[in-house]
Amino acid sequence: SIGMQHAAITLKPDFAVAYWQLSAALRCLGRVDEAVVYAEKEDSLRPDNPEFLFRFGDLYLECMRYRESFTALKQATLLRHEFPIAHSKLTELTRSLAQLNR
């Protein structure tokens, strides 16, 4: 899958979905830091897509990059008000951060 996504990106460098799929494949392999690089490229191609912002926020959360996670999740909920899973993840993140600050 990784090789196929690299091939897709080579053929069409602005194909945002290929960057996300490559990011997801790397994440599944535990290569989370590499996954973030490709997710950031995908986000630069589609910055106002709430679904991608949600997945991006979730990936940042996994990397313990809380500020970036909060920003992405908040933006996803602002772009799509009726987005229950994004609101839930944002609430979870906010609670976790509040507990860390105690």
Image (cartoon, grey):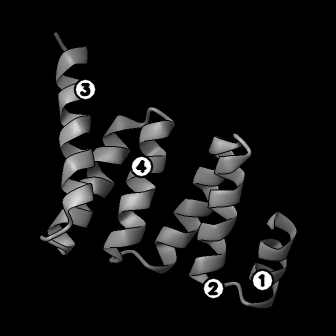
| Mark 2 nearby-residue class (10 Å; few <14, some 14–19, many ≥20) | some
90 displayed left or right of 63 = left
Q: Label 3's element?
A: helix
Mark 3 surroundings: few (<14), some (14-19) or many (≥20) residues within 10 A: few
Res 84 → quadrant: bottom left
Q: Where's the N terminus, which quadrant?
A: bottom right
**Percent of width and height locating residue 23:** 64, 60
Q: Are marks 3 and 2 in contact (CB under 8 Å)?
A: no
Disc 3 and disc 4 in contact, CB within 8 angstroms: no
Label 1: which residue?
A: 8
- Amino acid type, mark 1: Ala
Kindly identify which numbered label has been placed on residue 20: none
Q: CA distance from mark 3 to mark 1?
A: 38 Å
Which label lies toward us, 4 or 2? 4
The circle on residue 15 is 2
Residue type of the residue flagged with mark 3: Ser
For label 3, the residue is 96
Q: Residue at the spot x=32%, y=56% of the render?
A: 72
**Do the residues under discs 1 and 2 have CB atoms within 8 angstroms?**
yes
Residue lying at the far left of the rendered structure: 81
Mark 4 — residue? 58
| Residue type for callout 2 | Phe
Look at the picture and state if 78 lies above or below 69.
Answer: below
Q: Say which residue appears at 17% left-offset and 23% top-offset.
A: 98
Q: Residue at x 51, y 36 (%)?
A: 63
Amino acid carrying mark 4 in the image: Asp
**Alpha carbon separation for disc pair 4 and 1:** 24 Å
Give whichever of discs 3 and 1 has the lower sequence position. Answer: 1
x then y, percent, for residue 96: 25, 26
Q: Is residue 34 above or below residue 46?
A: above
Cα distance in 3D space between marks 4 and 2: 21 Å
